[in-house]
Amino acid sequence: MAMAGDKVHHSNAAPIPEGGLASGDVINQYTGEKWYYSDIVKDHFFHPRNLQLEDLVPERFDAFGMVGSPACGDMMSMGLKIDPATETIKELKWKTFGCGSAIAATSMFSVMVTENGGMPIEEARNVRPQHIMERLGGLPNRKIHCSVLADKAFRKAVNDYFRRTGQHERVIVEGSRVIDPKLNITDHDIEEAVLEGAADLDAVQQKLKVGIGSPEIIADVEQLIRFYKEKYYG
Ligand code: FES
């Protein structure tokens, strides 16, 4: 398993203060922005809970989900054991090629949905990335897409459970809608841009050129930016 990401760059880096990084764990060499990991994040990164590297295969679980992250190309697999009578999550195992933030966030998520006898799956579907971040004591903004990887794998696994148990009406499919027909840009593309840190129309347009030449869709784009900012950043 690779644990990429969270790099410290030395060339052209902002000067590191004497005695180490007092107020930030990593300093962005281009912007000087400090990226700080809480002690809880570090604990879950170095001691991940419910990580399973071997035999994490669909047949061994009641539900299984695997997703990739368009934001960074990493992936996440997740298996669930579910008590059919109460629909509570009895076990959640996972593995990822994601970075330290993905490892910490998924580890914390696995604790949240299995503690106290297990959370009902419908309740667990309402656990948002910002709830995971609250329990972690925060994540750097640029790392929020890493916690979304756990959320997406979980949603896929729950849909798998409903399909396996014939409850097709409970499956929630999150499809894409074309927002800019000229450039073929979807709501999903805008979601990814927000997850990569674009916080307003200007920043999203720098990444996607969405709405340039189509002023009639700008209001729709701005509404989506607000929606995804609220969804992921609270
Ligand atoms: Fe890919 Fe964090 S950078 S999961």
Image (cartoon, grey):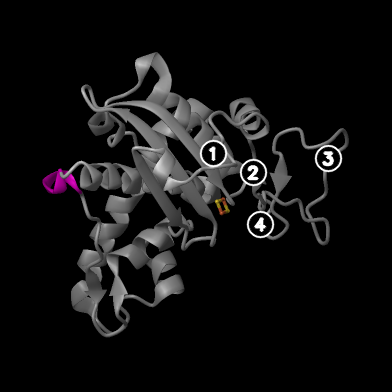
Q: Which residue is mark 1?
A: 139
Image x and y of residue 66, in percent: 43, 52
Q: Residue at x 47, y 51 (%)?
A: 145
Q: Nearer the viewer, mark 1 or mark 4?
A: 1
Q: Which residue is mark 4?
A: 31
Q: Amino acid at mark 1?
A: Leu
Q: Is residue 169 magenta?
A: yes
| Mark found first going from the N terminus, 1 or 4 | 4
| Mark found first going from the N terminus, 3 or 4 | 3
Gap between marks 2 and 1 measured at Cα: 8 Å
Extreme top residue here? 116
Query: Relative to 183, is 233 on the left or the right?
Result: right
The label on residue 35 is 2
Image x and y of residue 232, in percent: 38, 45
Q: Which residue is mark 3?
A: 17
Q: Work out whether residue 231 can be spotted.
A: no
Q: Residue at x 24, y 58 (%)?
A: 223
Q: Nearer the viewer, mark 2 or mark 1?
A: 1
What element does badge 2 sit on? strand
| Neighbours of disc 2 within 10 Å: few (<14), some (14-19), many (20+) | some
Q: Is residue 40 magenta?
A: no
Principal SS element in the magenta part?
A: helix
Q: Are marks 2 and 1 in contact (CB under 8 Å)?
A: no
Gap between marks 3 and 4 measured at Cα: 16 Å
What element does badge 1 sit on? loop
Gap between marks 1 and 4 measured at Cα: 18 Å
The label on residue 128 is none
Query: Relative to 151, is 186 on the left or the right?
Result: left
Which region of the structure is painted magenta?
Answer: 167-171
What element does badge 3 sit on? loop
Image x and y of residue 172, in percent: 20, 49
